Image (spheres, rainbow, N blue to C red):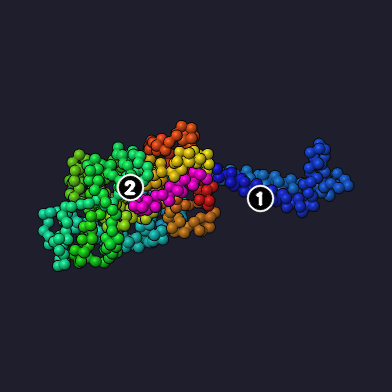
Amino acid sequence: MVWIKLGQTTTKLSLVLLVLLFSLSGYGFVDAAVGKNDRGIGAIFWMTGGGSSYGSQSNVGIAIAVTVMAGLAVAATLVYSNRGHLQSPWSRRRRKHALQPKQWKTLFDEDGRLCDGGVKLLKKVRNGGVHPDLRAEVWPFLLGVYDLKSSEEERGNIKTKNRKEYEKLREQCEQTYKQNDPNTPITEKCGTNSNCKEDSIDDGEVVDSYPLYDTAVPTGHDQPCDGGDGSEITVKSQTESSDSDSSEEADDIGGSPTPENVAEETDVRKDNTTSSNKGGCKASNSYRSESFATWQRIIRLDAIRANDEWIVYTPSQAAVCSKKAHTLAESVCLKDYSHLEACRIFHAARLVSILEAYTIYDPEIGYCQGMSDLLSPIISVVEDDSEAFWCFVGFMKKARHNFRLDEVGIRGQLNIVSKIIKGKDTHLYRHLEDLQAEDCFFVYRMVVVLFRRELRFEQTLCLWEVMWADQTAIRAGITKSAWGKMRLRAPPTDDLLLYAIAACVLQRRKLIIEKYSSMDEILRECNSMAGHLDVWKLLDDAHDLVVTLHDKI
């Protein structure tokens, strides 16, 4: 616990102070040792100054001063211990209400700028989250779409610019629909560029070339995980889709995109000033790659399977009319959705639209299963597709490393979780070593989709908001200010999620040590946590871990 560390530090300072006072007084500890055999007389001798007389009055003041200082040191230890124990902003005693609409309005000046550079906003969000009615307005600040110091006019300009760029990305996606349609004339597929050749278009042939991440145990642990939506996925050297229809197709999965394709695609994304009909064939051919065709197919499968937990939290989208839903679905070439209700069709179509655009925006990552889990809550909150897309881009700046083919990002985070557990509970860590589970692969799913499957919808959003507030404070340099050093009850960290995951495991230490004798059993326990976790308790425990272990980790 945090108070132990603070108490130990204060106690050491107290002892140093006492030694200093004793040395200045000219008295040693040797005389005090006499008290062991003279029924305390030696101690009295030491306290009163000793020498030729036990009752030297000249040293009474010094003795009193020493006693008082010792008492103050002990009191300070107790005070700081209690303060350390109560410092978590997420404890039940200190937990604040979510940011309210009335409070939100008071944070801006007449130009629409946050009055204090966003300090109050971030403090409020990280202490209690955001009111559901405000999320669509607040999240773009937390996800870096808008700068904390931007004015209302500047945000309007950014919004316009972002919308145009998103529309260009969607135009490139729509061009691939024509290329995939065998009935489309070859001239329409190629645009006006005369260099296009008919043999450069490979109609209908798709070779999978990117892995699928949904809920999984990583490479080396061929253990199926419950995906939370009834699906099971085993991640191997080449992973398979959890959907029965896509499992057969997944057998054809090959290698990752070639460096040449990635470079070509990246050049196209960066060329935001080029119109869709200028050099259109080059862009089309770039995104007609096998990888992009595979991503499109997987995105559609995942979109259809997306759960409906969000519906009760988004009444406006839940009430969408059937005509609007089917129109949007047809515009993104969504298929096999007849069994879904209108609101789920609409949601699935939006997932397809934004995820396809993201694969063009970030071709190095493209699309992997699990990314739809991260986007789904965002489009449930943010109803404008362009705004939702850029919020997702901001989210993925941190999360994109979870979806790398080489799993370097995931393994690095699992290593941090392992270190946290080792630093906090050596007994538990030794037990994990005995089970060959010290690599913490049993929390793989929690890391990949950031607790999305373990927490209920609303609690997921609360955790993400606190996490985003931490990351935004660090990005804006707020933690370097006097406010950051003196008033923050919990130091912001980029890895709050990992401390929460470690806290989740530590909460079950007794069960793991006494009852579980294999990694598979721990994995099943982690999967069974879904819907049974308290996000604020997790954050409260994570706070203690951050305070005590952050510098060491």
Q: For the residues carrying marks 1 and 2, which lies nearer the camera in this image?
A: 2
What is the span of residues highlighted in magenta in the rendered image?
400-423
Quarter of image, res 310:
top left
Say whether residue 308 is visible.
Answer: yes
**Nearer to the camera, 269 or 71:** 269
Cα–Cα gap, marks 1 and 2: 55 Å
**Nearer to the camera, 504 or 64:** 504
How packed mark 2 is, by other alpha carbons closer than 10 Å (few <14, some 14-19, many 20 or more), is: few
Q: Which residue corresponds to the image point at 41% horizontal and 49% vertical from the top-left?
A: 411
Residue 20 pos. (x, y %) = 73, 52
Residue 325 pos. (x, y %) = 20, 46
Q: Which residue corresponds to the image point at 80% horizontal and 45% vertical from the top-left?
A: 31
Q: Which residue is mark 1?
A: 13
Q: In the image, is residue 469 part of the stretch drawn in magenta?
A: no
Residue 430 pos. (x, y %) = 51, 40
Residue 238 pos. (x, y %) = 30, 47
Q: Which residue is mark 2?
A: 237
Say whether residue 370 is visible.
Answer: no
Report the residue that reaches farthest toward the right. 52
